Amino acid sequence: MKLRQFAFIAGLLTAAVISGSPPAGDDRPQRPVPAGEVIGLNGLRNVEFGDTEDELTRRGILRTDVVACGPTLAGHELASPVFVGDRLVLLWAGDPMRTAEGITSGTPVAEVRARYPSATPLHAPRGTYRLDGLLARQGDRAYLFLHDGRQVRKVIAGYAEWARRLFEEGAGPC
């Protein structure tokens, strides 16, 4: 993983935590599942985990000509790719992207636990500005749901090993 990718993930984690949570007595209605693009454990439409940077560039999907912290995916502007050794290993999903089960930013943590009952809770180190997580693993793939204890703040999908490593090291996609 590129150093700038780790730095960007750390920045995103910090920004998500600093943005805060709604007051404890907040009784806003639950958000409906958005009609956004679905991110799966294989990746996105025409972008799969394990694809190489060269392969995605040749197909016209990986773009480096836009002003961003790293490469972007044409047609998937809300997803931030993370490459390790030239292979796509993780995707950060921007709102309103969702899992096939309808989990997106803003989904209550209780709903995530209901839809992914075997998800492993991950606890951020005390004294840091990092979010807790739920790792919903299936084989060598996983969703990492970063949350503030009440609702999901970020959805990340990809190889389980890299999702756990991202959580433990606190890094970002740039």
Image: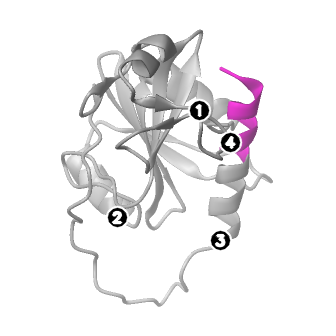
Q: Which mark is residue 107?
A: 2
**In whole angstroms, how far apart are the C-alphas of marks 4 and 3?**
21 Å
Which numbered marker is on residue 64?
A: 1
Could you give the CA–CA distance between mark 1 and mark 4, rounded to whole angstroms? Answer: 10 Å
Q: Determine the image quadrant of residue 151.
A: bottom left
SS at circle 3: loop
Q: Circle 3 is placed at which residue position? A: 19
Q: CA distance from mark 4 to mark 2?
A: 27 Å
Q: Residue at x 38, y 60 (%)?
A: 109
Residue type marked 1: Thr
Q: Are marks 3 and 2 in contact (CB under 8 Å)?
A: no
Residue 86 coordinates in the image, percent (x, y) = 55, 11
Contact (Cβ within 8 Å) of mark 1 with mark 2: no
Percent of width and height locating residue 96: 35, 61
Q: Depth check: 115 or 76 in front? A: 76
Q: In which quadrant is the C terminus drawn? A: top right
Q: Helix or strand or loop: what does disc 2 sit on? A: loop
Label located before the other in sequence (4 or 3): 3
Residue matched to label 4: 69
Q: Secondary structure at mark 1?
A: loop
Upstream in sequence: badge 3 or badge 2: 3
Q: Determine the residue positioned at 39% across, 29% down.
A: 61
- Image position of 107 with respect to 164: above or below: below
Residue range in magenta is: 1-10
Name the amino acid type tagged 3. Ser
Q: Which of the two discs, 4 and 2, labels the residue nearer the N terminus?
A: 4
Q: Amino acid at mark 2?
A: Thr
Q: Is residue 21 above or below residue 154?
A: below
- For image coordinates 65% across by 31% down, the residue present is 168
